[in-house]
Amino acid sequence: MKQLTALLPRVFHPAAEDLPDPNVLLAPEGYFVYATNTPGINVPVVFSADLQSFSLLGDALPVLPRWVRRGFTWAPEVAKLGQRYVLYFTARLRRSGRQVIGVATSECPQGPFVAADQPLITMLESGGAIDPNVLITATGEHYLYWKNDGNAVGQPTQLWGAALSSDGLSLLSDPVALLTATEPWERELVEAPQVIEGDGVFHLLYSCADFGDESYAVGHASGPTPLGPFHKTCNAPVLASHGRLAGPGHSHAFRTATGHWQLAYHAWETGRCGYPKGRRALHFLPLQLDGGHLRLTFPSVNAEACD
């Protein structure tokens, strides 16, 4: 990872700095963006009042639990559940070296979050578990989504979901397999699931292929319930390399303060994919939902996914 320099807080330049696997939370103060670890920061947290200017605040999870091996804290997700904020994070087990999902809580969106003594989801028999994401439905139900890290051990990858307790600290149902790689462009790998709701339809966004090159892209599926069944849509991928941006992915859809959808994602610069020469910079696109349709608005072209 490219190092984020201290002194903190400081001005942050989204298009010029490394901020992979972004997760955006709208809070009363403004927008908080959480990302995969960088040297010296377990969970970077960036703040913006208007999505125009940004500040790097520091580390949302400064103290890791004992079961975690430092340096592999990936793909955080923060949601407000009840009166506190809950952070889900991917971390590496000290003993086995597998990635699993932990949970932490804080009274403030910027943290510090305090992690539980044990992981929430492990799935060690399937390679581990990564990329957590939360859905709160219009009727107030909670769901957690993730990927089994099968590619780490030569097994297939699948996206999973389960009902989540109201406090966000435990699962209420057995995991349900939602989707796996079936298309050539997915290159036998799916990850980074997110389910959002619109007009009674549940939309599953997910990333595919190799995050380290220009093949990385975002797919879309839709279904009638939070746990599917999900059907992949006709025009895929809905977000792929374009212009000067290569390998866009690990997206996160969120509503702005005005109620409009935006899609945050990271991308390399064309010709500079992979570390150490490249960086995964933060980008945004407007997103619209219309029944089973999901549309991204690019500066000069539209991309659409439909049933």
Image (cartoon, grey):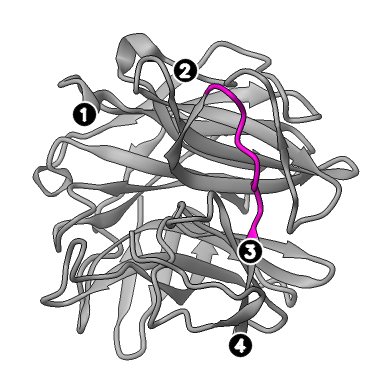
Q: Is residue 40 above or below residue 97?
A: below
- Residue denoted by label 3: 58
Q: CA distance from mark 4 to mark 3?
A: 16 Å
Seen at 15% across and 21% down, the residue is 154
The kind of residue on which mark 4 rests is Ser
Q: Is residue 178 above or below residue 214?
A: above
- Residue denoted by label 1: 151
Please state which of residues 98 and 226 is positioned toward the viewer in this rendering.
Answer: 98
User: How would you rate the neighbour count of disc 1 (Cα within 10 Å): few for under 14, some for 14-19, many for 20 or more?
Assistant: some
Nearer the N terminus, badge 4 or badge 3?
4
The kind of residue on which mark 2 rests is Thr
Nearer the N terminus, badge 1 or badge 3?
3
Residue 63 inside the magenta-drawn segment: yes
Q: Quadrant of residue 262?
A: bottom right
Horizontal side of residue 228 vs 3, given as left or right: right
Nearer the N terminus, badge 1 or badge 2?
2
Q: Position of residue 42 (x, y in %)?
A: 53, 49
Nearer the N terminus, badge 4 or badge 1?
4
Query: Of helix, strand and loop, which one carries label 3?
Result: strand
Query: Range of the magenta residues?
Result: 59-67
Q: Position of residue 99 (x, y in %)?
A: 39, 28
Q: Is residue 203 visible?
A: no
User: How would you rate the neighbour count of disc 4 (Cα within 10 Å): few for under 14, some for 14-19, many for 20 or more?
Assistant: few
Q: CA distance from mark 3 to mark 2?
A: 28 Å
- Residue denoted by label 4: 53
